[in-house]
Amino acid sequence: MNIIIVGLGKMGGNIAKKLLKDNHNIIGFDSDKNQSNTIEKYGAKIIDSLEDINSLDLSPKIVWMMLPSGKITQKTFTKLLGILSPEDIIIDGGNSNYKLTRARFDDAKKLDIHLIDCGTSGGIWGLKNGYCLTIGGEKNIYEKLRPIFNSLTPKNSKGNLYVGESGSGHYVKMIHNGIEYGMMQAIAEGVELLKNKSEYKLNISEIVNNWKDGSVIKSWLIDLISDELINDKNLENFSSYVDDSGEGRWTIEESIELGIPTPVITAALFARFRSRQIEPISGKVLSAMRKGFGGHEVKNG
């Protein structure tokens, strides 16, 4: 199939490479010429602007957006609506908020343009292992795009999962990422407990490597941290600052709207917030109160 990919960074670039390997025709655009040049070497045709889509002799035009969620995705989507024609298709493979996806679907529908939301998991390893996709939107459009999804996903997945109407693909991906936050935090806390049990002089790298096989908690996340610990036993190449990309926040917002408690995911997100603070005032307030009511000794700042 002929696919126009907008956004050729780590994820979009690998998606382009994987589709090219399966003999799809890729037309790529990225504002970063270095990214474009890299994908061109793999056989993609590169266009210099979104407006160049107009000159492509394709019907329908299929545009896969692989961009960071937020303003850049909205700006690109709006621009595409002014460029594309009725029956053309936009696939949003990024981590857009599902509520925005539903609104965009309605905007596209007014112009007879189709929007498919595709939750895309697999990270930088998707090129090798295949991607896990959860797809929302019109079922008949999904079926037309199955050759694309079949090429991107593991062979036994048969193109992966159509989950429902518009927004559902991004909704499921959002919950997936919330679960991911909780799992990562539990592993991190467990490793910290092992590290601080100094009387046993535990070899953390060997222990985590042992968990990779036969353990109840064996997982890809365990594999990844095991590999890092083998190369850097104290993780000295990393800081304790941990960012978040938004899906954990949206998951918690959803839990509040639905009245469903999510203490693990919430605590995991808050741990990331705390990781970015240096000498937060809340700790100082606690120390001050303890000194005030009990005369407890405190450390000076």
Image (cartoon, helix red, strand yellow):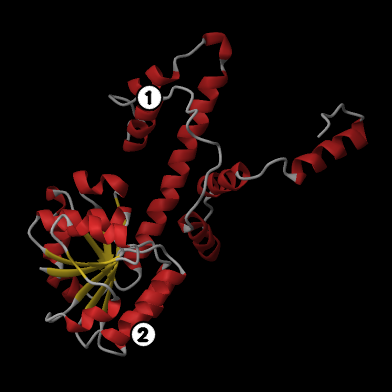
Mark 1 falls on what kind of element?
helix
Above or below, 258 against 58 in this view is: above
- Relative image position of residue 186 (x, y in whole percent): 48, 36
Quarter where residue 27 is shown: bottom left
Residue 260 shown left or right of residue 225 in the figure: right
Q: Is residue 245 visible?
A: yes
Q: Amino acid at mark 1?
A: Asn
Counting from the top left corner in percent of width and height, residue 209 is at: 34, 22
Residue situated in front as seen by the camera: 9 or 15: 9
- Residue 15 seen: no
**Few, some or many C-alpha atoms within 10 Å of disc 1 (few <14, some 14-19, many ≥20)?**
few
* Numbered badge on residue 9: none
Q: Quadrant of the N terminus?
A: bottom left
Percent across and percent down for residue 296 are: 88, 28
Q: Earlier in the sequence, mark 2 or mark 1?
A: 2
Q: Is residue 14 left or right of residue 188?
A: left
Q: Where does the C terminus fall, quadrant-wise?
A: top right
Task: From this view, report whether residue 228 is shown above or below residue 80.
Answer: above
Task: Find residue 289 and report its image quarter.
Answer: top right
Q: Quadrant of residue 212?
A: top left
Q: Position of residue 45 (x, y in %)?
A: 16, 66
Q: Hey, what amino acid is under mark 2?
A: Asp
Residue 107: numbered disc:
2
In the displayed structure, 91 sits above or below 127; it is below
The residue at the point 61 percent across, 45 percent down is 276
Q: CA distance from mark 2 to mark 1?
A: 50 Å
Give the labeled residue for mark 1: 231
Crowdedness near tag 2: few (<14), some (14–19) or many (≥20) residues, C-alpha within 10 Å: some
The number of numbered discs placed on residues in the rendered structure image is: 2
Q: Secondary structure at mark 2?
A: helix
Q: In the orientation shown, which residue stands out farthest toward the left?
A: 23
- Viewer-nearest of discs 2 and 1: 1
